[in-house]
Amino acid sequence: MGYRVAVVGATGNVGREILNVLWQRQFPVDEVIALASRDSAGKEISFGEGPILKVKALDTFDFKGIDIGLFSPGASISKIHAPRAAAAGCIVIDNTSQFRMDADVPLIVPEVNRSALAQFRQRNIIANPNCSTIQMVMALKPLHEIARVKRIVVATYQSTSGKGKAAMDELFEQTRAIYMNQTKEPKVFTKRIAFNAIPHIDVFMSDGSTKEEWKMVNETKKILDASIEIAATCVRIPTFIGHGEAINVEFHTPISETEARAALRKAPGIEVFDDRRDGGYATPVDCAGEDATFVSRLRKDPTVPNGLQLWVVSDNLRKGAALNAVQIAEDLIRDHLKRPH
């Protein structure tokens, strides 16, 4: 016997990927329910190579009897429906930003802080971190265990899929327009995304940072270590899938390149691709469709004591969202839930 699982926001980029990952990893399900807005009700959606699912309306759905809800409908929707599902006994794993910084909601990357998962019982809600945060803490956790991270300076290069299907479509349409000597004005982004880079993801904060940068700082502190100092610049680039990050790390104690490389090679979910030759590094194209977080360009940072530099890429729809959520669900049933009878 398996579990009854609801996928909320099933018609979006992340929701579709969650359905794929559930199927690929043979998650023990008796039933999968696809939920989305009322406008999407009745549409059909694939569940891997399994049965075609008919989408149901979220706003009228009764979560009683649902074991696990995998939510990715947007923060404002999760704010309404995640607590409703949790009150009905459904354990919610939420991909949005709505609950991440709540003290009584665990923020989980299974390879990094699996033990914190036990806190889910306080509200029946577990938060999935931001995609850019996930891949950074994946790479830093094994190093933090050796030398303790003191300070991080990170610049991200984030794909358009992080902003949804409409953003990917805008990149495609603007690129095509340029080749046809036409103009396609931006609607999703603040400036043209094709052949450009936009240092603006999410809304601006009062201190000049963006909400995406705020998320990276505060989520990393919650997941890894509250004492770490972090400066982030988040940039949207004209790629479809896969985020890149250039990370400079200062540690409290010395750590050699050899030690760091060995620790990363042993770390779960990490692939070291660092040959120091032309093409001997991972790019967003290389990581698309892959589960691993790839680390390349590992080297000393000569400007600070105990410093390293590294380049990290990951598929933002898989490890950055869908895969991480399903891994949380796997650990949840392994560590905390009895198999239903």
Image: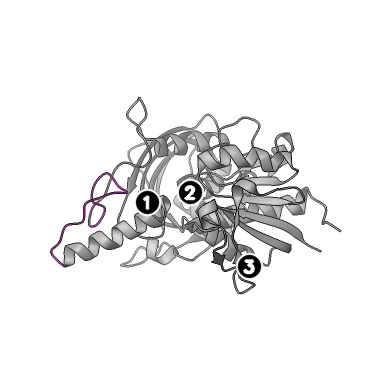
Q: Quadrant of residue 212?
A: top left
Tags 1 and 2 touching, CB below 8 Å = yes
**Local secondary structure at mark 1:** strand
**Local secondary structure at mark 2:** helix
Position above or below: 87 against 25: above
Position above or below: 338 against 304: below
Q: What range of the chain is rendered magenta? A: 180-196
Mark 1, Cα crowd under 10 Å, few <14 / some 14-19 / many 20+, is many
Residue type at the position of mark 3: Trp
Name the residue: 32% across, 46% down.
Answer: 235
Question: Percent position (x, y) of residue 98?
Answer: 54, 37
- Tag on residue 23? 3
Q: Main secondary structure of the magenta part?
A: loop
Q: Earlier in the sequence, mark 3 or mark 1?
A: 3
| Front position in the image: 302 or 124 | 124
Residue beneath disc 1: 158
**Considering the image in quadrants, where does the N terminus appear?**
bottom right
Q: Is 195 colored magenta in this rendering?
A: yes
- Tag on residue 131? 2
For the question of whether residue 159 can be seen, the reply is: no
